[in-house]
């Protein structure tokens, strides 16, 4: 029996079992049903997953590669896991750990930690669930201040934990039922209780004597800890403890060190190696079966039993969570392009204010919605504060959808709304006749019963939102919001905006220590550096990256700042003042960045080039394809693999300096001040023209002509195309403008498309002359835009002009002239002017036959177009005659399997279908469909067209059941390959609905 195969988005529970050869088996035995792993991109996720259903929940199990455990490897596993499985709502980390005896043993043996027990990482005392014992600050007197902690798990899991505890107290738990899954498997011997005599706790300072796994036969039993023994009945009872867990990067096999960890981690009951590696910002409940006492007497005797008990507890826990809890979360979305920032520090007052103003994510009374606006200097940390808030909100209330909208320009705004529309699959969002922004706005305004929070990032251009300017939408953007400081007031509906100022001294010092991972540098030195950098978070982070990259001290960096070229820094600082930035902070940023620019140029040539190149694009969501294309444009004798390595290393340098930030979707962002300083630096170096030309060439090479299939790529590249258009009058500029216009046309943005097409046409008229072939192409494109809008007279006027000039300059028999005549014939055909359309098509056909030959592809195309006119007029015999001639010629010249031949056969079959000649139509349609399946594949759009047409014929012949089955197959494949909203998919669905 084949296993079910779901989508990554269908899984809601992450189960991490780090030790693959020990913890994976009991984890899989807990599943009620195993699924075939879903499809995902192994180029960016090298994990191998086990998926299935457990108590009704769809669970994905991930494990570390054999022999590669620990926090670092766990981080690699979960980092990829949470990107692939985007709808994971909760996570459990399940496996073994070292038990830590309580400082004061209880008289009740079930209260003490024994081998085989389970420790759940939740003490419930208001402190952290887990503590990273390797990371902290030692104070006089031997006191450790723990700096690395893991916050509380997901609230749903904590509520389920409370239910487990209560059921266990009432003797209503089902642990033994779950244990039977282990004991009834063929591996049952692994999961049997090893025996009370194997559970020995020695004093912390007593070292093991003998070999590993020799059952401590050489150890002194007088050194055993005197504590109440468990009975056989208690040994057969499932026992678990709620408590704090310590996590680190090394295996602990020393009793004295174990007890030190317990004391410094507020009474931890377990020590392990993976909890700190779980992806930052993901609430995770840690469940550990105790396999040893983290001392030198460690052995393998209890490992399988402990791993099995941890899995049993995890199943009991998940079984307490009603399916409705997960189902209620299915409609929530987390459309945030950035990962959580593990180095975020301070800003507690602002975060507390946000929580108060927004009601901690709770629903408001009445119909009003809370709005809060943050304003402040670029680089002061507004985005990071918002990011910290949304990740906090996601953890505390996962039922709230969070939507992140880039608002720096109209194109980025449009792209963000497109992402929201695609995430929710909002009806009508792909229809070019609809205003996408208005579709999303109206849809959000109907979601009163659901909670959502929208973040407008970089909304600092008031003209973009409130004034009518030359932007990529006919309306100002405030009209599309559901419902400079001035902008914040207006967006926040008159509420006083929250100003984000520079960090204070304590926050700045804390940020530098966190970034540098440094506890030894004097606070006075860090405070001095923070002061020199104006307490600006972006500058502090960049300075720390520079010091780590160059391995210099804080004092050495301060000396470099003092020895830098003050005149250059002052010159670059003026850029910010004339750009409306009167704060002194940008000058400090410029000082920091110019030092780094020079360092990178000297040591990493490609990194310097990429920095220069990307500064001339739009600063947000710079596609990785642009960087790769630039890198490959450079002449190199290096193999391709080495080129890719060089690119990766260069990007690593830029990321280390915080000049670019990598997003979750393999794109990169550049801060606005970094962009401005870099551009000014290029001007001072005299290289802005060089890199401007490269940016134009890369974008013009990669930006596709706008079609339905390329709409996503066009939207992603749109803002970059607009950016490079302002760089120069390079000939490629007009090419980009023409492709941009095609994108706008396919999005139904006729005015913007028309404007660009007109600009391209007029520029080419001026530079090349009205009769230049490129000018004529521009005129034809503009005519096409008119034709798409049904503006037949304007289209006809241009097409007549193009045709007449082409006839005069090129001659009536030139291929371009014939194309212009065919375009005009198409306009006549759309107007129902059949005689005029026929006259032109006949002329095109006759000339093509004469000049090129009756069997030339262009001549055959014109014959096919003429046949279409005949068919539209109901002149079946004439249409059939031409279609047969085209088909037979193409068979001879191109072969029966050629796509053009198959198109001819399909057209002839449709002509038979129009006449009710079902058998003849079926014969050709079957041949076309089967040939396309063999040559193109069953899911190719052309194959699906053949399938759709054959279903029509079968239905016309009265073979209704066959027709319905074939149309259902066509619909299913079209939905998978083209999407549910593709016009072809909708047409097939409509047909099937009419049949049934």
Image (spheres, rainbow, N blue to C red):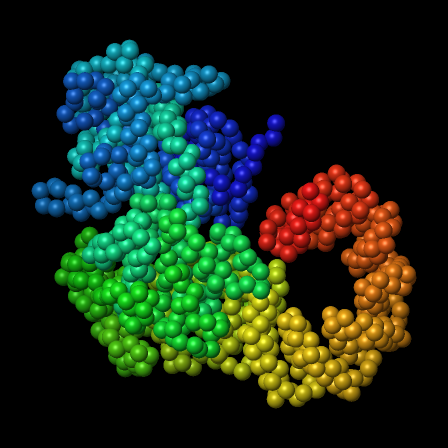
Q: Nearer the viewer, residue 165 or 964?
A: 964
**Position of 956 compared to 588: left or right?**
right
Residue located at (36% from left, 59% from top): 455
* Residue closer to the observer: 396 or 554: 396
Residue nearest the viewer, comparing 347 with 915: 915
Q: Is residue 26 above or below residue 510?
A: above
- Residue at the spot 49% in from the left edge and 37% down from the top edge: 49
920 left or right of 57 in image: right
Q: Is residue 254 left or right of residue 851?
A: left
Residue 784: quarter of image: bottom right
Residue 342 visible at all: no
Q: In the image, residue 949 lies at what x, y percent?
A: 76, 51
- At 31% from the left and 26% from the top, the residue drawn is 164
Residue lying at the far top in this picture: please name it: 232
Where 373 sits versus 201, above or below?
Answer: below
Q: Residue at x 9, y 42 (%)?
A: 141
Across and down, in percent, residue 897 comes to 81, 53
Quadrant (top left/top right/bottom left/bottom right) for the C terminus: top right
Q: Position of residue 80 (x, y in %)?
A: 44, 46
Q: For residue 294, which quarter of the picture?
A: top left
Which residue sits furthest front? 366
Q: Quadrant of the N terminus?
A: top right
In this rendering, the answer to whether 429 lies above or below 574 is above
């Amino acid at each position: 029996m084949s296993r079910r195969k779901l989508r990554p988005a269908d899984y809601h529970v992450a189960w991490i079992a780090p030790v693959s050869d020990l913890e994976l088996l009991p984890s899989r035995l807990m599943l009620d049903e195993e699924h075939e792993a879903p499809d995902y991109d192994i180029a960016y996720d090298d994990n191998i997953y086990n998926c299935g259903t457990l108590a009704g929940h769809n669970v994905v199990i991930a494990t570390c590669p054999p022999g590669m455990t620990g926090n670092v490897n766990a981080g690699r596993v979960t980092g990829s896991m949470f990107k692939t499985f985007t709808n994971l709502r909760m996570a459990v980390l399940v496996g073994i750990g070292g038990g830590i005896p309580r400082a004061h043993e209880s008289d009740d043996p079930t209260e003490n930690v024994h081998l085989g027990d389970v420790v759940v990482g939740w003490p419930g005392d208001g402190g952290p669930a887990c503590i990273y014992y390797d990371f902290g600050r030692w104070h006089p007197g031997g006191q450790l201040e723990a700096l690395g902690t893991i916050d509380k798990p997901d609230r749903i899991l904590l509520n389920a934990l409370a239910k487990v505890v209560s059921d266990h107290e009432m003797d209503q738990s089902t642990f033994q039922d779950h244990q039977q899954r282990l004991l009834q498997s063929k591996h049952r011997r692994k999961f049997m209780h090893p025996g009370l005599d194997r559970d020995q706790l020695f004093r912390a300072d007593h070292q093991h004597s003998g070999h590993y796994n020799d059952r401590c036969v050489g150890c002194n039993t007088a050194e055993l800890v005197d504590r109440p023994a468990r009975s056989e009945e208690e040994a057969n009872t499932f026992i678990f403890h709620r408590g704090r867990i310590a996590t680190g990067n090394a295996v602990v096999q020393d009793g004295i060190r174990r007890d030190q960890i317990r004391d410094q981690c507020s009474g931890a009951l377990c020590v392990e190696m993976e909890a700190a590696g779980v992806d930052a910002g993901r609430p995770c409940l840690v469940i550990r079966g105790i396999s040893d006492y983290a001392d030198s007497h460690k052995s393998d005797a209890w490992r399988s039993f402990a791993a099995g008990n941890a899995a049993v507890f995890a199943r009991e826990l998940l079984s307490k969570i009603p399916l409705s809890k997960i189902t209620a979360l299915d409609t929530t979305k987390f459309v945030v392009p950035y990962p959580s920032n593990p180095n975020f520090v301070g800003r507690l007052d602002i975060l507390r204010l946000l929580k108060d103003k927004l009601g901690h994510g709770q629903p408001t009374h009445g119909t009003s919605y809370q709005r809060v606006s943050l304003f402040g200097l670029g680089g002061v940390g507004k985005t990071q504060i918002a990011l910290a808030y949304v990740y906090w909100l996601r953890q505390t209330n996962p039922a709230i959808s969070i939507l992140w909208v880039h608002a720096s320009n109209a194109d980025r705004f449009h792209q963000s709304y497109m992402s929201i529309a695609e995430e929710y699959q909002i009806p009508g969002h792909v229809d070019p006749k609809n205003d996408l922004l208005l579709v999303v706005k109206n849809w959000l305004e109907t979601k009163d019963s659901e909670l959502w929070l929208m973040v407008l990032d970089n909304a600092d251009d008031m003209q973009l939102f409130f004034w009518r300017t030359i932007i990529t939408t006919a309306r100002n953007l405030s009209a599309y919001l559901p419902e400079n400081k001035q902008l914040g007031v207006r967006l926040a509906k008159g509420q006083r905006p929250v100003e984000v100022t520079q960090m204070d001294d304590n926050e700045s010092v804390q940020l530098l220590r966190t970034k540098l991972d440094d506890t030894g540098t004097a606070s006075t030195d860090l405070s001095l550096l923070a002061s020199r950098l104006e307490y600006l978070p972006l500058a502090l982070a960049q300075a720390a990256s520079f010091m780590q990259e160059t391995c210099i001290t804080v004092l050495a960096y301060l000396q470099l700042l003092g020895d830098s070229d003050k005149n250059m820094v002052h010159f670059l600082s003026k850029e910010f003042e004339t750009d409306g930035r009167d704060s002194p902070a940008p000058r400090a940023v410029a000082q920091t960045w110019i030092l780094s620019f020079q360092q990178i140029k000297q040591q990493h040539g490609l990194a310097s080039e990429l920095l220069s190149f990307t500064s001339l694009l739009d600063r947000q969501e710079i596609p990785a394809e642009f960087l790769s294309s630039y890198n490959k444009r450079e002449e190199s004798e290096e193999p391709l693999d080495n080129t890719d390595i060089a690119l990766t290393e260069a990007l690593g340098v830029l990321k280390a300096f915080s000049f670019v930030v990598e997003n979750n979707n393999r794109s990169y962002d550049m801060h606005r001040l970094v962009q401005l300083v870099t551009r000014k630096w290029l001007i001072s170096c005299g290289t802005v023209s060089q890199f401007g030309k490269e940016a134009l060439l890369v974008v013009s090479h990669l930006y596709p002509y706008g079609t339905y299939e390329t709409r996503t790529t066009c939207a992603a590249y749109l803002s970059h195309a607009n950016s490079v258009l302002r760089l120069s009058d390079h000939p490629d500029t007009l090419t980009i403008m023409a492709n941009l216009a095609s994108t706008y046309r396919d999005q139904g943005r006729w005015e913007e498309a028309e404007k660009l097409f007109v600009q391209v046409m007029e520029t080419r008229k001026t530079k090349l002359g009205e009769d230049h072939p490129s000018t004529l192409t521009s005129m034809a494109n503009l005519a096409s835009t008119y034709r798409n809008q049904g503006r037949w007279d304007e289209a006809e006027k241009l097409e007549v002009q193009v045709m007449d000039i082409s006839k005069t300059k090129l001659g009536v028999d030139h291929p371009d002239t014939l194309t212009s005549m065919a375009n005009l014939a198409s306009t006549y055909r759309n107007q129902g002017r059949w005689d005029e359309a026929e006259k032109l098509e006949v002329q095109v056909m006759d000339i093509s036959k004469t000049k090129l030959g009756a069997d030339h592809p262009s001549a055959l195309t014109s014959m096919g177009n003429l046949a279409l006119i005949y068919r539209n007029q109901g002149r079946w015999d004439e249409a059939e005659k031409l279609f047969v001639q085209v088909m037979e010629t193409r068979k001879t010249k191109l072969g029966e399997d050629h796509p053009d031949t198959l198109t001819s056969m399909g057209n002839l079959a449709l002509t038979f279908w129009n006449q009710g000649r079902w058998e003849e139509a079926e014969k050709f349609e079957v041949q076309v469909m089967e040939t396309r399946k063999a040559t193109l594949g069953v899911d190719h759009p052309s194959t699906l067209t053949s399938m759709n047409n054959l279903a029509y014929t079968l239905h016309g012949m009265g073979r209704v059941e066959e027709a319905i089955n074939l149309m259902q197959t066509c619909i299913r494949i079209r939905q998978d390959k083209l999407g549910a909203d593709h016009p072809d998919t909708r047409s097939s669905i409509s047909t099937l609905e009419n049949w049934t």
